[in-house]
């Protein structure tokens, strides 16, 4: 049997390698692929650059040429070729550095987003931890705003995932899981559950132009409490000892 005649043949190039398909219907089939992102045959931009800057060729020999002239012509060609090769390598190095810079930037951006997400998860947990037994009017308003903007298609699935956690072969629907969770809640945990329901969908980093309901909720639910707790703990360690040691040092010096 012949190989698929419809398959597009790959034009040969310096970076062509044979690849074997390891997944799917065409399993085991061999293909030729190009492994150079900046291949002058397969990358249009590289092709355009190569066309704009062709490799030097030796000047044609004039009709009558002395040996000396021929050697000079060859030398000139060698010089041009060396220059061309140097320039090519410089560009190659530049591209490599650009690629590495982009990689580093991507990684930094990835880490930055991971950090933000971690902070948002912490905020979410803090909001639930400090959930009051009864909402104030301001809190209820924020809660309702978050609720009406939720994506109804993923809401119960995402929240139920939290409660289903350990029980992987659970056949219950997300709604069943949530209903039985509500039935098992003590009265003082109801608002925390309500907040989980309303805010789980907002833990992710909002897209550009998207309103940040988690931050809005943080302002009315989670802000005052942690501040009250942290202040008295921090103050004695950070401010007073520094002032004291400074005073002592002065005395010793004098
Ligand atoms: Zn190629």
Image (tube, helix red, strand yellow):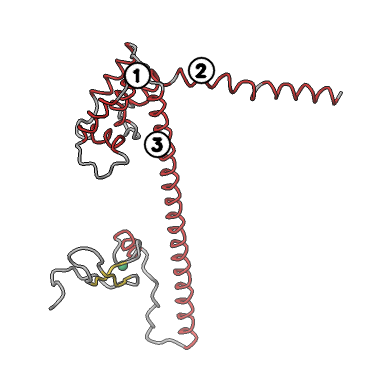
Which quadrant of the picture is home to ligand 1?
A: bottom left
Task: Residue 127: give x, y in percent of width and height.
Answer: 39, 24
Near-viewer residue (82 or 153): 153
In which quadrant will I find the N terminus?
bottom left
Q: Is residue 172 left or right of residue 96?
A: left
Image position of 147 with respect to 205: above or below: above
In which quadrant will I find the C terminus?
top right
Q: Is mark 3 within 8 Å of ligand 1?
A: no
Residue occupying the point 47% across, 69% down: 83
Q: Residues within 10 Å of mark 1 (few under 14, many from 20)?
A: few
Secondary structure type for disc 1: helix
Near-viewer residue (253 or 11): 253
Image position of 62 with respect to 152: above or below: below
Mark positioned earlier in the residue sequence (2 or 1): 1
Q: Residues within 10 Å of mark 3 (few under 14, many from 20)?
A: some
Near-viewer residue (122 or 62): 122
Image position of 173 with respect to 188: above or below: below
Task: Residue 116: give x, y in percent of width and height.
Answer: 42, 35
Residue occupying the point 40% across, 29% down: 125
Cα separation, mark 2 vs mark 1, equals 22 Å
Tell me the residue that label 2 is attached to: 228
Cα separation, mark 2 vs mark 3, equals 25 Å
Mark positioned earlier in the residue sequence (2 or 3): 3
Cα separation, mark 1 vs mark 3, equals 28 Å
Image position of 230 with respect to 95: above or below: above
Tell me the residue that label 3 is attached to: 117
Secondary structure type for disc 3: helix
Q: Mark 1 and mark 3 in contact? Answer it, CB < 8 Å.
A: no
Q: Is residue 209 left or right of residue 176?
A: right
């Amino acid at each position: 049997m012949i190989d698929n005649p419809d398959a597009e043949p790959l034009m040969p190039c310096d970076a062509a390698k044979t690849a074997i398909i390891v997944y799917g219907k065409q399993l085991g089939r061999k293909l030729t692929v190009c492994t150079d992102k900046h291949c002058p045959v397969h990358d249009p931009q590289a092709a355009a650059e190569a066309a704009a800057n062709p490799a030097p060729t030796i000047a044609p020999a004039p009709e009558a040429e002395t040996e000396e002239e021929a050697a000079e012509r060859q030398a000139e060609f060698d010089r041009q070729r060396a220059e061309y090769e140097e320039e090519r390598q410089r560009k190659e190095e530049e591209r490599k550095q650009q690629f590495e810079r982009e990689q580093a930037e991507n990684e930094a951006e990835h880490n930055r987003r991971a950090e933000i997400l971690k902070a948002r998860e912490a905020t979410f947990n803090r909001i639930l931890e400090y959930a009051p037994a009864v909402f104030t009017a301001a809190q209820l308003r924020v809660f309702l705003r978050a609720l009406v903007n939720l994506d109804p298609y993923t809401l119960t699935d995402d929240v139920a995932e939290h409660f289903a956690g350990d029980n992987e072969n659970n056949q219950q629907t997300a709604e069943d899981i949530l209903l039985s969770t509500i039935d098992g809640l003590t009265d003082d945990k109801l608002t925390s559950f309500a907040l989980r329901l309303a805010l789980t969908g907002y833990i992710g980093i909002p897209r550009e132009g998207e309103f940040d309901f988690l931050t809005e909720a943080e302002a009315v639910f989670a802000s005052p409490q942690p501040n009250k707790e942290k202040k008295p703990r921090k103050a004695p360690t950070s401010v007073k000892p520094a002032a004291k040691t400074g005073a002592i040092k002065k005395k010793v010096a004098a």
